[in-house]
Image (cartoon, rainbow, N blue to C red):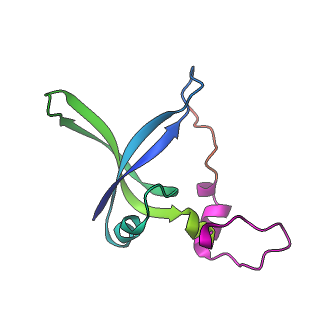
Amino acid sequence: MTVASCAVNLECRGSDEPETEWIGLCAFGKQAEALAALPDNSMISAIGRIQINKWTGANGEERRGLQMIVDQIVTAKSVRPGGGRKKAAGKADHKPGPTEYAVAGGAAGDFNDEVPF
């Protein structure tokens, strides 16, 4: 089991500056090993179940926070081995692996979509 924290920048209506929300990550098995092996400040995409944790702080104040039980973690290096930039079209000599197709070609690769509320 590995527990970590992930900073997520969220845009808020009525504000020009994004707010940073910290989400706890909890992973098991191979995903825990992958999460533990990542250096600090790694860019990741995580898929899992979000839950709200509630507790009482040392000062007696009730606190709450978000935590994700991780099913899958994809890093920038998983998508682009070596973490380098993509080559120009027609000059690629690297064939993407199955993980790269799943992230780059599917809905999981589109992180700028609007949430329909």
Specify whether residue 89 is painted magenta: yes
Q: Is residue 116 left or right of residue 3?
A: right
Quadrant for the C terminus, please. top right
Q: Is residue 51 left or right of residue 111?
A: left
Give the percent coordinates (x, y) of residue 36.
36, 66
In front: 101, or 32? 32
Give the percent coordinates (x, y) of residue 33.
36, 71
> Number of marks in the image?
0
In front: 3, or 38? 38
In front: 63, or 115? 63
Q: Is residue 77 above or below residue 3?
A: below
Query: What residue appears at the point 79 percent right and 75 percent down from the top-left corner?
Result: 92
The quarter of the displayed image where residue 60 is located: top left
Specify whether residue 84 is painted magenta: yes
Query: What residue appears at the point 77 percent right and 68 percent down from the top-left corner?
Result: 87
Residue that sits furthest to the top in the current view: 14
Give the percent coordinates (x, y) of residue 72.
45, 63
In front: 81, or 68? 81
Q: Is residue 105 above or below residue 99?
A: above
Quadrant for the N terminus, please. bottom left
Query: What residue appears at the point 86 percent right and 72 percent down from the top-left corner?
Result: 90
Q: Magenta span covers which residues?
A: 81-109
Give the percent coordinates (x, y) of residue 59.
14, 28
Query: What residue appears at the point 61 percent right and 63 percent down from the top-left corner?
Result: 103
Residue that sits furthest to the right in the current view: 90
Residue that sits furthest to the front in the current view: 40
